[in-house]
Amino acid sequence: MNERIYLSPPCMLGRERQLLLDAFDSNWIAPLGPHVNAFENEFAQRVGMKHAAAVSSGTAALHLALLLTGVGPGDRVVTSSFTFAATANAIKYVSAEPVFVDSEWTSWNMDPNLLRECLQKCRSENRLPKAVLTVDILGQCCDYASIQAICSEFELPLIEDAAEALGATYQNRPAGSFGDIACFSFNGNKIITTSGGGMLVTNSADRAAKARHLATQARDPAPHYEHSEVGYNYRLSNLLAAIGRGQLEVLDEHVRRRRGIFEVYQNALSERPGLTLMPEIPGGKSTRWLTVLLIDPQKFGEDRESVRQRLEAANIESRPAWKPMHCQPIFQGCEFVGGNVSLQIFEQGLCLPSGSSLSWEQQKRVIEVLLGSTR
């Protein structure tokens, strides 16, 4: 059996080990410490925001972002249907209801025209949502020129779920700089990782301070443990922040490698009937966090699942694209605006190995097995 090729494994390229040992040797093992402070400052500067709060996961960042925006029981939040469950789950954490909007083919992100249609309908019914929560899917920013204008028109706060898009840009602005609050993930498969962790960024000093307060069990300033509101154990450890600082230093190299991997796939696959790769939004630069291939079974002769199983038989990890949230059992009954764009991406979409450490020999094997030239 050939050595397994993983979808997006961690890849350490810089000073991660050195910084981790520095944190270890300093005995700053518990949550918080100098590396957390430095990671927050360096990260905020990188994404073009004034403040950052390092937390235990991207999901924790989303939860805090909704709380900071004032979303609560009975409120509605408009979000993308084509996303990982964490986006919608966080809305449920605050006892609000998601309203799902379909994707558009230009970027596979939230369709601005459908967003406007949704908000117009909500306004006519006197039930505007509390916030709009966009998702920068698979390493690519949304059409923020349109979405920001729409949110401004309806006077709605914008939360940006940039968990999958660190390093991407749109109109020369970095992912994470478009929302009133933005959230990132450093899960093990992301473009940079701390093994587990996340970041909330904002231009508001008050919101950043509030995020840190809530993430540290909402402890009041007193010599004893005093609590006036519900808090959470969401802060990032100093050890993981040290790894994150090392990873952030080589983010550009990760982006360069993944975009190169995409180009190899594109050159090898785009001319084959029935195979289409994820587009890049005009004015944007995707990180190509994951290369996603659409497989039209009528033209290619096989469906996505058949190809996935063939790759798995060759010890190559791949996975279907996200199943839309409006199609998930847990969100049945939630409002959905749109057609079948996200559903078609799910039914035909296959995520291919895209890790920064993927070698040419490994990628060649993926392509050969995918095309059926070797098994």
Image (cartoon, helix red, strand yellow):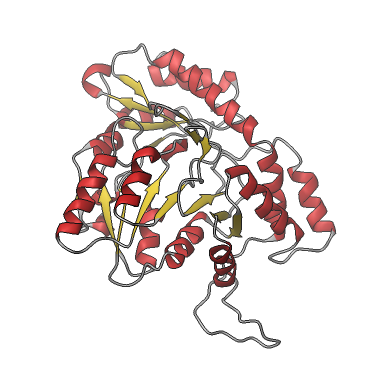
Residue at coordinates 49% horizontally, 40% vertically from top-left? 165
Give coordinates of residue 91: x percent, y percent: 36, 62
Give coordinates of residue 232: x percent, y percent: 53, 72
Residue at coordinates 56% horizontally, 66% vertically from top-left? 206
Q: Quadrant of the C terminus?
A: top left
Which residue is most to the right? 25
Which residue is most to the front? 153
> How many badges with numbers are in the image?
0
Give coordinates of residue 105: x percent, y percent: 29, 31
Would you identify the image quadrant in which residue 48 lies? top right
- In the drawing, does residue 38 fall left or right of residue 326? right
**Would you place residue 261 above or below residue 153 in this image?**
above
Residue 200 makes an appearance in the image: yes
**Would you place residue 91 above or below residue 367 in this image?**
below
Would you identify the image quadrant in which residue 75 lies? bottom left
Q: Nearer the viewer, residue 137 or 196?
A: 137
Residue at coordinates 61% horizontally, 64% vertically from top-left? 235
Q: Quadrant of the N terminus?
A: top right
- In the drawing, does residue 368 fall left or right of residue 82? right
Give coordinates of residue 226: x percent, y percent: 61, 87
